[in-house]
């Protein structure tokens, strides 16, 4: 049991080191020696736990997707009203900027989905969880009478996720025509229209 906990702790250390290395070097250029340097260990120590870099990249993708979603879900859960929950979901769905480390790695990892079924499954899983999160907020608002939905719950939820993904990509791509405040405004305007709360 102790050995298993130690191994898991060491793997988590390497995952965090890989996150930092990817942000510094980029996913395609990062090497085991870069991750080892970030972790303060020898490359051999990393290779003992991760003989293949691809295995470590998968764990990085899984971890960053889980962290991203957990932060969203916790923030939404902490909000009291359906309106505040919806606002929280929108705010946490967009990158804070190009220096958003979690968003940077998440977008880079998603690029692996077109050539890896395992990475595609992670991407699909995150999408489904995000749609479900919006769906739960919409259901709460409908049940409490705060929202009058103009379209089916799933359609609105899927549209919100698609909008935030598209706008987020522009933000991470340094599109100077799209600022974060603009992206949040566009998402919020659609959300209010779809929930009968046009301002």
Image (cartoon, helix red, strand yellow):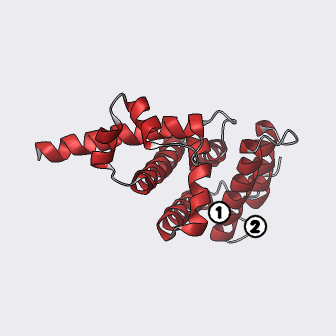
Residue to which mark 2 is pinned: 150
Q: Position of residue 76 (x, y in %)?
A: 54, 45
In front: 184, or 19? Answer: 19
In front: 123, or 71? Answer: 123
Q: How many marks?
A: 2
Label 2, residues with CA under 10 Å away: few <14, some 14-19, many ≥20 = few
Residue with the most extreme left position: 1
Label 1, residues with CA under 10 Å away: few <14, some 14-19, many ≥20 = many
User: Upstream in the sequence, badge 1 or badge 2?
Assistant: 2
Q: Position of residue 155 (x, y in %)?
A: 68, 70
What secondary structure is found at the residue carrying circle 1? helix
Q: Position of residue 34 (x, y in %)?
A: 47, 36
- Above or below, 108 against 26 in this view is below
In front: 89, or 43? Answer: 43
Residue to which mark 1 is pinned: 157
Q: Separation of disc 1 and disc 2 at Cα? A: 12 Å
In front: 135, or 92? Answer: 92
Q: Position of residue 79 (x, y in %)?
A: 54, 41
What secondary structure is found at the residue carrying circle 2? loop
Q: Residue at x 75, y 43 (%)?
A: 171
Residue with the most extreme right position: 177
Q: Residue at x 71, y 48 (%)?
A: 168
Kindly indicate the quadrant of the structure image that contains residue 33. top left
Q: Nearer the viewer, mark 1 or mark 2?
A: 1
Kindly indicate the quadrant of the structure image that contains residue 44. top left
Q: Is residue 68 visible?
A: yes
Q: Residue at x 38, y 55 (%)?
A: 52
**Would you say 84 lies left or right of 162 here?**
left
């Amino acid at each position: 049991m102790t050995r298993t906990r130690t191994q898991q702790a060491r793997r988590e250390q390497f995952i965090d080191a890989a996150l930092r290395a990817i942000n510094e070097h980029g996913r395609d250029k990062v090497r085991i020696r870069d991750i080892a340097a970030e972790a303060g260990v020898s490359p051999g120590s990393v290779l003992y736990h991760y003989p293949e870099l691809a295995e470590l990249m998968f764990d990085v993708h899984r971890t960053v997707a889980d962290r991203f979603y957990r932060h969203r879900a916790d923030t939404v859960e902490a909000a009291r009203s359906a309106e505040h929950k919806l606002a929280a979901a929108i705010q946490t769905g967009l990158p804070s900027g190009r220096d958003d480390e979690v968003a940077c790695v998440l977008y880079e990892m998603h690029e692996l989905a077109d050539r890896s079924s395992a990475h595609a499954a992670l991407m699909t899983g995150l999408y489904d969880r995000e749609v479900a999160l919006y769906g739960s907020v919409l259901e709460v608002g409908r049940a409490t009478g705060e929202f009058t939905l103009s379209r089916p719950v799933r359609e609105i939820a899927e549209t919100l996720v698609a909008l935030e993904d598209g706008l987020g990509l522009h933000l991470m791509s340094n599109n100077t025509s799209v600022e974060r405040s603009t992206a949040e405004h566009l998402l919020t305007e659609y959300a209010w229209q779809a929930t009968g709360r046009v301002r």
